[in-house]
Image (cartoon, rainbow, N blue to C red):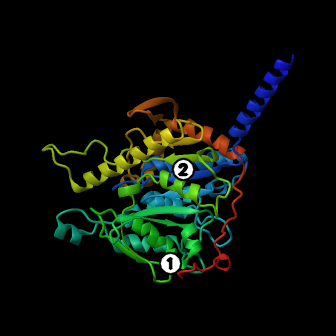
Amino acid sequence: MELSNVTLDIFTKLEQKWLSHCQTTNKVRILSIDGGGTTGIVAASAASLIHLEDQIRLKTGDPHAQIADFFDMIAGTGVGAITAAMISADDGTGHPLFTVREAVKFITQNNSKLFKVNKLAGVLHRQKRFSAKSMGKVLKEIFKREDGTVLTLKDTCKPLLIPCFDLKTSAPFVFSRADAAESPSFNFELWKVCRATSATPSLFKPFPLISVDGKTSCAAVEGGLVMNNPTAAAITHVLHNKRDFPSVNGLDDLLVLSLGNGPSCGRSKVRNNGECSTSSVVDIVLDGVSETVDQMLGNAFCWNRADYVRIQANGLGLGLGLGGERMMRPRMEEVLNERGVESLPFGGKRLLTETNGQRIDGFVQRLVASGKTSLPPSPCKESAVSPLPNGR
């Protein structure tokens, strides 16, 4: 009898521990959006994001709910960074400047301006180059409030993380709201941050930028070269940022959604003569970086498909700008109706029985069950920032 009571007590405690482990209320929610390679915005992440926000609104019954309401950290690279910044930039009232649909629509309509071919540079360099001036003009328009305020990294509803590669130091440079809150030397205008992470070497010149106080400079090229899939950087940031995430002690405290953009280079990696174009080499690097990060995170989460979900299109690296809005809807539906793909522990991939849309639906159920994020909209106001001892 005593043994039975001890056994019951043990199993009761184990059950309580298991149930508490399964609770999502205390988990920090991370959204990560891959870069789009050299093709601009692609159907994969656009479809996933729109479906994600639609499902959040459906399951909460709130027609005005937005992604930023349910995620504690948003990260992005390249065109994924532009989207991430648009849906997290503060309109001045604590709400995002754009819904996901508005952001995707704006980028799609302005794709030809963001990636406008510079004909003169193309003749001189004998390869296609895009206009830095045209992209900069569009980005400045995006990240400016109606009252004319130019937004910086500090002006976001939720913590934001965007990587680039700094040619001056030959090392990754990660822009984050946390650093911007610590010091104006790490606060940059949002349009410049997005311009920096989009500076693909084969298509744009390196982009020089300086912090708002003029003390930190960077010669940036595309962040995708080192972090096309910024999920690992976002997770590391959360684990070590005790100011914004004091309750996080390990991966068990995280709920992560990582949105891929499909293979950047499709099937045209190698020409008939066996050579690769410069843009194809860049796309191969971007694909390799993204898939390597996914493989490592799958292992780190012990292939826990509930806490770490990676949505990746199976062979659809389709630029929305190639067909405009007319082609956007059928491509997005195709992405959502595809069966999901998942990395295997020892390499390779497998097709899942669930579609990408169904996997997002399942993630949203856990997301909504945990309620809206409890992080304050902006802990980085001027009044809350104390200069660092070294004056940075």
Q: Quadrant of the N terminus?
A: top right
In this rendering, the label closer to the viewer, 1 or 2: 1
Q: Residue at x 15, y 44 (%)?
A: 274
Q: Which residue is mark 2?
A: 49
The relative height of residue 165 versus residue 318 in the rendered view (above or below) is below
Q: CA distance from mark 1 to mark 2?
A: 32 Å
Percent x, y of residue 343: 44, 36
Q: Decide which of 242, 93 is in the foreground and name it.
A: 242
Q: Residue at x 82, y 19 (%)?
A: 3
Q: Is residue 82 visible?
A: no
Q: At label 2, which amino acid type do we have?
A: Leu
Percent x, y of residue 190: 50, 71
Percent x, y of residue 340: 48, 35
Is residue 258 found left or right of 223 in the rendered image? right
Q: Residue at x 65, y 75 (%)?
A: 381
Q: Is residue 285 visible?
A: yes
Mark 1 or mark 2: which comes first in sequence?
Answer: 2
Crowd rating for badge 1 (residues with CA inside 10 Å; few <14, some 14–19, many 20+): many
The relative height of residue 183 versus residue 1 in the rendered view (above or below) is below
Q: Decide which of 189, 256 is in the foreground and name it.
A: 256
Q: Secondary structure at mark 1?
A: helix
Q: Decide which of 150, 389 is in the foreground and name it.
A: 389
Q: Secondary structure at mark 2?
A: helix
Percent x, y of residue 2: 86, 19
Quarter of the image for residue 325 reads bottom left
Q: Residue furthest left?
A: 273
Q: Which residue is mark 1?
A: 185
Residue 100: give its label: none
